[in-house]
Amino acid sequence: MAEEHRLPRRKKAALSIAVLLTLSCTSIGRVTAAEGTAAGQKAGNDAGGKMIAIAIHGGAGTLPRAEISSEQEKQYLAGLDAALDAGYAVLKRDGTSLDATIAAVRVLEDNPLFNAGRGAVLNRDGIAELDASVMDGKTLSAGAVSGLRHVKSPIELARLVMDKSPHVMLVGAGAEEFAKLQGVEVVPNEYFVTPVRKLQLERLLRGAVTTKENDLAAFGTVGAVALDSSGNLAAATSTGGMTGKRWGRVGDSPIIGAGTYANNASCAVSATGHGEFFIRTVVAHDICAQVEYLKIPLAGASANVLAKMKALGGNGGVIAIDPKGEVVLDFNSEGMFRGVATSKGRREVAIFR
């Protein structure tokens, strides 16, 4: 899904800039071609020479490149690299795509720069409410959770819903009761709250945000898709939603078919952007359906679906992977925090086009 002008001028605005940055999900950097090739050559010998790949995102948004300091860029770059490393390490050990996506998303949930887990945006009452989902492309099994307030890793609970319950989606108090029965780590809600997110909410409530800042508050979310050495696909997505959300609002991230979908017959997709539009256009499933039934290449299917959503007024992006290891990182916003690593030598993290 997706969740997070002019910023106040430099000195006084440093914190506000950071606030918008964490939510907007803008650019990071890119490893050099030489570094990517070297990493890929080594990776080609992992997993018995079979194709493996993982892609991640940290949200889509529209913050101009000029608003990002070099230090902020380094921090985001390091965060994406760490998540990419965690997921790819699982694949190199012949681990499953499901385990790889969970590993990558967990790193992003623990990083307060991103809108998921610790550092998630706050609802109108100043409380972090978290959503997540995961899907196994081999079995079409799926698990999702929404409205969590105390589960440290929402993506881990989504996995347990899939593996340990007869259900696909659990919400609110019921989901947290299930978490306790499963021995999942729970924390006070204050664990998720950061000064940056508190300031962000305060600005929103007193009407101090610009139209553009308000748009940025719709974006955030983290996610991963992967192909393992057995040829299986998986997708995982986690988010804190929208700043100032109320009435139990739920976006696309925990909705199977909207923000997350995986099927070995087509592709795996994790989405980020304005969740309401992703739900209305069933973005993740639509991309996979076009690949499977219309035989449209992954890049074309992604472009088709994002164009349809944009025509309705929606912005955001997707990461997607097919059974051959083709990876697509597509977005119709100004940028998307993203990264990819494959055994063919592709390795990068970036944001702007």
Image (spheres, rainbow, N blue to C red):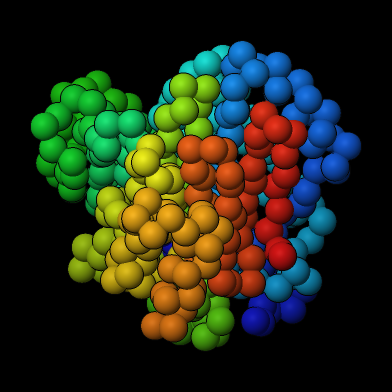
The structure residue drawn at horizontal position 52% and vertical position 56%, both measured from the top left corner, is 297
The structure residue drawn at horizontal position 35% and vertical position 48%, both measured from the top left corner, is 261
Closer-to-camera residue (78/326): 326
**In the rendered view, does 147 fall on the left or right side of 347?**
left
Closer-to-camera residue (98/301): 301
Q: Is residue 137 above or below residue 239?
A: above
Closer-to-camera residue (337/207): 337
- Visible residue check, residue 82: no
**In the rendered view, does 335 fall on the left or right side of 153?**
right
Q: Quadrant of the C terminus?
A: bottom right
Q: Report which quarter residue 174 is drawn in.
A: top left
Q: Position of residue 65 (x, y in %)?
A: 75, 69
- Visible residue check, residue 168: yes
Total marks in image: 0
Q: Position of residue 200 (x, y in %)?
A: 50, 67
The structure residue drawn at horizontal position 43% and vertical position 68%, both measured from the top left corner, is 305
Q: Quadrant of the N terminus?
A: bottom left
Q: Is residue 136 above or below residue 12?
A: above
Q: Is residue 330 above or below residue 51?
A: below
The structure residue drawn at horizontal position 32% and vertical position 27%, both measured from the top left corner, is 185
Q: Position of residue 163 (x, y in %)?
A: 23, 26
Q: Residue furthest right?
A: 34
Q: Position of residue 135 (x, y in %)?
A: 33, 39
